[in-house]
Image (cartoon, grey):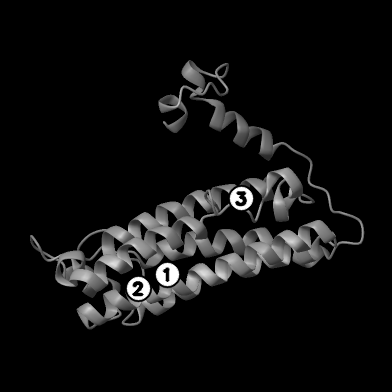
Amino acid sequence: MPSYFQCRLGPMRVGYWGLLQVFADVLKMLIKEIFFVDRADKLLYAVAPLLVIIGSVGAFSFLPWNNGATILDFNVGVFLLTAISSIGVVGIFLAGWGSNNKYSVVSAMRGAVQMISYEMSLCLCLITAVILTGTMQMSGIVEAQTGPWKWLVFQGHIPAIIAFFVFLIAGNAEANRGPFDMAEAESELTAGVWDSVSSTSPSSSTSSSSQVSLLQCSWVVGLL
């Protein structure tokens, strides 16, 4: 949609208006050869992409989709939500360290530091929702906002509004979206921390970034 608004022509040959390009890219990634870099730590090299996916997908299990439709609904749900979503930081750093590549290590440190710093802001914003509702249970926070004009943005006034905008900025940085995409820095670090990784691992990082963006939107709707 942004490309359409800005009159930018992208891949147009696969399907009508290029709508099948995403499926073509997925197929291309799946059939690529999986190889290991020489002198790389094989264990960390293989585990890092899994940690990134676990951190982004696992956080969705704490979101209340409907009344009673929650996979995991603990009384400390906010705490566990932030803990599970933070696993991706470990995967990012292990991907750079395990590849035994100085450029990947530099990108991993940049990415990990950025994610940790902005996750602190995200957690502080979530504490605002906990204080206003008096509970850390995800379903309890959602139920406290049932009814018109009961959203925390309206109940909390200035503190909730500030937390809302800080959450949007920090969430954008957490997902490595511009202008916070310096962790990959295509002009100097190519694919960033994944420049020595083959096959589905880079695509798993890209998909996890999109999942993090969707997760941030779900947090905004449910918690703020």
- The location of residue 19, given as percent across then percent down, is 48, 24
* Residue picked out by circle 2: 126
Q: Which residue is mark 1?
A: 122
Q: Residue at x 91, y 61 (%)?
A: 39
Identified by mark 2, the residue type is Leu
Sequence-first disc among 3 and 2: 2
Distance, label 3 to label 1, CA atoms, is 23 Å
For the residue pair 189 and 203, the one nearer the viewer reads as 189
Specify whether residue 46 is in view.
no
In whole angstroms, how far apart are the C-alphas of marks 3 and 2?
Answer: 27 Å
Q: Viewer-nearest of labels 3 and 1?
A: 1
User: What is the crowding at mark 2: few (fewer than 14 residues within 10 Å), some, or many (at least 20)?
Assistant: many
Is the residue under label 1 in contact with that under label 2 (CB below 8 Å)?
A: yes
Where residue 158 sits, quadrant-wise, is bottom left
Tell me residue 191's x, y (percent): 71, 47
Q: Could you tell whether 218 is left or right of 94 in the image?
A: left
Q: Which mark is residue 90?
A: none
Q: Is residue 152 above or below residue 29?
A: below
Q: Residue 204 shows which numbered tag? A: 3
Three-letter code, disc 1: Leu
Which residue is found at the position 80% from the left and 51% from the top?
A: 196
Q: Nearer the viewer, mark 3 or mark 2?
A: 2
> Residue at horizontal 36%, vertical 55%?
217
Give the left or right position of residue 95, taking residue 6 as reference: right
Q: Quadrant of the C terminus?
A: bottom left
Name which residue type carries label 3. Ser
Q: Secondary structure at mark 1?
A: helix
Give the image location of residue 127, x and y in percent: 34, 78
**Residue 102, horizontal then vertical, whole percent:** 84, 61
